[in-house]
């Protein structure tokens, strides 16, 4: 599949006349608990040619393969690719958007080109806002809980759609840093040895074994624990500093450097 992803990346660049600066895995495979039929959720950041940016009209700043956009080669049905144009990614990074932070900390990288990506990763650490990320992960916990935990039984997969963002929020509270994307790292750091940790480990084995289609009886006291943790973490979030350094000038410069690096010939022609 990795070779197929590389081929699709190259074809996107040709068909859409862009350069892909960075591409990574962002779903269950990056989190460390894929099942055999899990999708490949590839996310990428791309940049257009210089003259694309010389327009008074707003243009499409997302590429989605195969959901909305296409490339001129067959796509594996397990492959889902979505990318943000660089200036969109930079605006989201300026707000400490947790999705872009997760992309940049993914350990499964399919493509990384030019110096801009290392600079983005450095800026991600500088611009990280615990408050913004906590709100994001807590909203994810609440949304997934209300969507999937209202009956007496819950799919194994859905436990992790709640557990992972909950542990990410707890990591931020404990370490004041970007949470690791790997679920096992969160689990080892935040959940002490005992029955609860063993229950999670057992569910994790079932998820990886492909049992996510089966229903699991609700874990005793989990709902009560979840409500208390949400309430506690929301109170904590309100108490912390919400300011994010204004990095607009630095991000503008980074964009110009990336544009020159990726399209040196076109940039030179534009300047004539």
Image (spheres, helix red, strand yellow):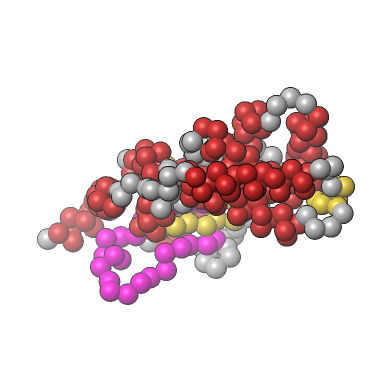
Q: Residue 158 placed where, x, y %?
A: 74, 50
Q: Residue 101 placed where, x, y %?
A: 47, 45
> Where 11 falls versus 190 (above or below)?
below
Q: Nearer the viewer, residue 270 or 134?
A: 134
> Where 47 falls versus 222 (above or below)?
below
Q: Residue 20 placed where, x, y %?
A: 41, 51
The part of the image, by quadrant, that contains residue 128 is top left
Can residue 38 be seen?
no
- Name the quadrant of the N terminus: top right
Residue furthest bottom in the image: 57
Left or right of residue 267: residue 147: right
The part of the image, by quadrant, that contains residue 206 is top right
Q: Nearer the viewer, residue 38 or 105?
A: 105
Q: Nearer the viewer, residue 119 or 25?
A: 119
Left or right of residue 165: residue 238: left
Q: Residue 110 placed where, x, y %?
A: 50, 42
Residue 208 falls inside the magenta stretch: no
Left or right of residue 148: residue 74: left
Region in magenta: 43-65
Identity of the residue drawn at 72% across and 58% down? 146
Q: How many marks?
A: 0
Identity of the residue drawn at 28% across and 74% down? 56
- Name the quadrant of the C terminus: bottom left
Residue furthest top in the image: 193
Residue 51 falls inside the magenta stretch: yes
Can residue 15 be seen?
yes
Identity of the residue drawn at 57% across and 36% down? 171
Identity of the residue drawn at 81% across and 43% down? 221
Residue furthest left in the image: 272
């Amino acid at each position: 599949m990795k070779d197929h992803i590389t081929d699709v990346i190259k074809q996107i660049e040709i068909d859409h006349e862009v350069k892909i600066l960075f591409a990574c895995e962002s779903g269950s495979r990056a989190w460390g608990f894929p099942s055999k039929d899990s999708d490949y959720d590839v996310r990428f950041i791309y940049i257009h040619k210089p003259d694309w940016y010389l327009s008074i009209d707003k243009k499409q700043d997302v590429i989605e393969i195969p959901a909305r956009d296409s490339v001129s080669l067959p796509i594996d049905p397990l492959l889902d690719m979505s990318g943000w144009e660089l200036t969109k990614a930079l605006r989201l990074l300026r707000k400490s958007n947790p999705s872009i932070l997760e992309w940049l900390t993914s350990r499964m990288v399919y493509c990384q080109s030019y110096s801009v990506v290392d600079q983005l990763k450095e800026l991600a650490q500088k611009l990280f806002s615990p408050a913004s990320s906590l709100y994001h992960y807590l909203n994810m916990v609440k949304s997934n809980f209300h969507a999937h935990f209202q009956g007496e039984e819950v799919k194994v997969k859905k436990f992790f759609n709640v557990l992972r963002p909950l542990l990410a929020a707890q990591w931020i509270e404990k370490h004041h840093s970007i949470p690791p994307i790997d679920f096992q790292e969160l689990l080892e750091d935040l959940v002490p040895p005992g029955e609860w940790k063993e229950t999670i480990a057992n569910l994790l084995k079932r998820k990886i074994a492909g049992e996510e289609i089966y229903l699991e009886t609700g874990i005793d006291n989990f709902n009560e624990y979840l409500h208390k943790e949400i309430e506690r973490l929301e109170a904590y979030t309100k108490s912390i500093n919400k300011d994010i350094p204004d990095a607009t000038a630095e991000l503008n410069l980074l964009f110009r450097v990336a544009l020159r690096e990726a399209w040196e010939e076109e940039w030179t022609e534009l300047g004539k």
